[in-house]
Image (cartoon, rainbow, N blue to C red):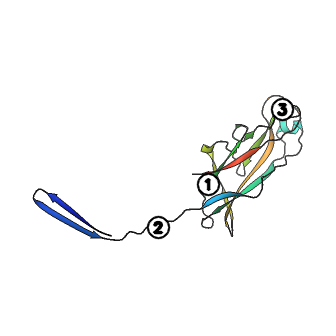
Amino acid sequence: MAFTIDWLVGGAALQIRGQGTTELVNDVYFSGCESVGAAVNVQMGKQTIQHIKNGDVREVPFNFDVRCTGLKSGAKVPVKVYFEGSSQADGMLKLSRLGQAGVATGVGISLVNDKGAKLPFDITRSIALDWNRDAADGSIYRFSGSAKYAPTGGEIKPGKGDATMSFVLNYN
């Protein structure tokens, strides 16, 4: 690239000539991320009302993997995750069909990640995924957490304790 600048000030003229090169580099940070595997079904099992009241219920671990392509091995991924579902607050999922016959009352499902942080139900509190391993078709990032039944207030009555939530990948 060559350029010339002519500058006239008062009666004086100045001409500047330059030459150089510019290199454009298209360095894509990463191509994209997607969920790996089928839906995760967390089997909570049966719990007694007394165990729920006392906080003595067992935590059920769960995890899911996300494959990101176009990253260097072990790179910190600019993708975070948050959750969607019927939630009264971060880390507490309401039961499905609440108020219908045969559904437990006074109980929800407490959800935390493997570091003990409540799962966020809002995009502004999205959490990072942890690098797990490299695969032939990209890097695998894993989310690990646990779920357990917890009291939500009011009288606890027995019944079904099912709930559904989705995870959302947040590219920011």
Q: How many marks?
A: 3
- The x, y position of residue 154, in whole percent, is 80, 28
Q: Residues within 10 Å of mark 2 (few under 14, many from 20)?
A: few
What kind of residue is marked 1? Answer: Val
In the rendered structure, the answer to whether residue 171 lies left or right of residue 98 reads: left
The answer to whether residue 36 is above or below residue 18 is above
Q: Residue at x 16, y 59 (%)?
A: 8
Q: Residue at x 89, y 43 (%)?
A: 46
- Compare residues 125 and 11 and report the one nearer the observer: 11
- The x, y position of residue 128, in whole percent, is 63, 53
What kind of residue is marked 3? Answer: Thr
What kind of residue is marked 2? Answer: Val
Ranked by sequence position, the earlier of labels 2 and 3 is 2
Residue for badge 2: 25
Query: In 3D space, how far apart are the residues under numbered discs 2 and 3 (Cα atoms)?
Result: 59 Å
Q: Quadrant of residue 91?
A: top right
Residue for badge 3: 105
Mark 3 falls on what kind of element? loop
Residue for badge 1: 79
In the rendered structure, the answer to whether residue 24 lies left or right of residue 94 reads: left
In the rendered structure, the answer to whether residue 112 lies left or right of residue 50 reads: left
Q: Quadrant of the N terminus?
A: bottom left
- The x, y position of residue 44, in whole percent, is 84, 46
Query: In 3D space, how far apart are the residues under numbered discs 1 and 3 (Cα atoms)?
Result: 36 Å
Q: Are marks 1 and 3 in contact (CB under 8 Å)?
A: no
Ranked by sequence position, the earlier of labels 1 and 3 is 1
Q: Name the front one of labels 1 and 2.
A: 2
- Compare residues 75 and 169 and report the one nearer the observer: 169
Mark 1 falls on what kind of element? strand
Q: Residues within 10 Å of mark 1 (few under 14, many from 20)?
A: some
